[in-house]
């Protein structure tokens, strides 16, 4: 028959849960209020090979260039203030995820 889904609610620091769980997760959905930057390292380590990592960033002002220093601190990139700032923001977020994944010999597709 079809596999059964195992969903277990947990209440603790997400970074700790992601790093202490023995079995890798098939899907990890990061949807923090604000930046996901502090969760990326743990997330790329705990998602299974071939798994799905879903990331939401609600700090678009930072990613779009309103505070370049904060963006560099959180994501390792300087944003551009231009008409294409939303595309640039997405590229910054993807580059940050890729950098975290590369530390563990992983990559994003």
Image: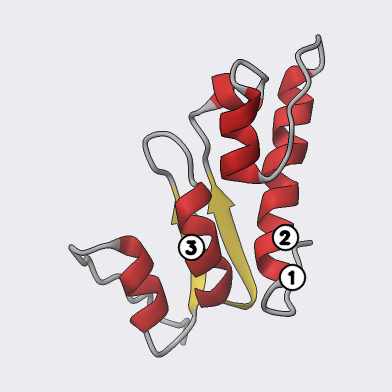
- Give the CA distance from mark 2 to mark 1: 5 Å
Q: Is residue 34 left or right of residue 8?
A: right
Secondary structure of the residue carrying tag 1 is helix
Q: Residue at x 21, y 64 (%)?
A: 12
Does 33 sit above or below residue 9? above
Is tag 2's residue or tag 3's residue first in the polypeptide sequence?
3
Does 45 sit above or below residue 36? below
Secondary structure of the residue carrying tag 3 is strand
Q: Residue furthest front?
A: 69
Is mark 2 in CB contact (under 8 Å) with mark 1?
Answer: yes
| Residue 9 coordinates in the image, percent (x, y) | 22, 65
> Circle 3 is placed at which residue position?
28
- Give the CA distance from mark 2 to mark 3: 18 Å
- Give the numbered dot on residue 99: 2
- Give the CA distance from mark 1 to mark 3: 18 Å
How many callouts does the rendering have?
A: 3
- Give the numbered dot on residue 102: 1
């Amino acid at each position: 028959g079809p596999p059964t889904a195992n969903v277990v609610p947990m209440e603790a620091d997400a970074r700790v849960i992601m790093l202490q769980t023995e079995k890798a997760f098939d899907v990890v959905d990061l949807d923090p209020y604000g930046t996901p930057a502090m969760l990326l390292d743990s997330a790329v380590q705990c998602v299974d090979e071939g798994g799905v990592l879903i990331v939401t960033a609600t700090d678009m002002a930072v990613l779009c260039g309103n505070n370049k220093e904060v963006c560099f601190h959180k994501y390792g990139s300087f944003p551009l203030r231009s008409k294409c700032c939303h595309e640039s923001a997405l590229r910054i977020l993807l580059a940050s995820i890729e950098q975290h994944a590369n530390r563990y010999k992983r990559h994003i597709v």
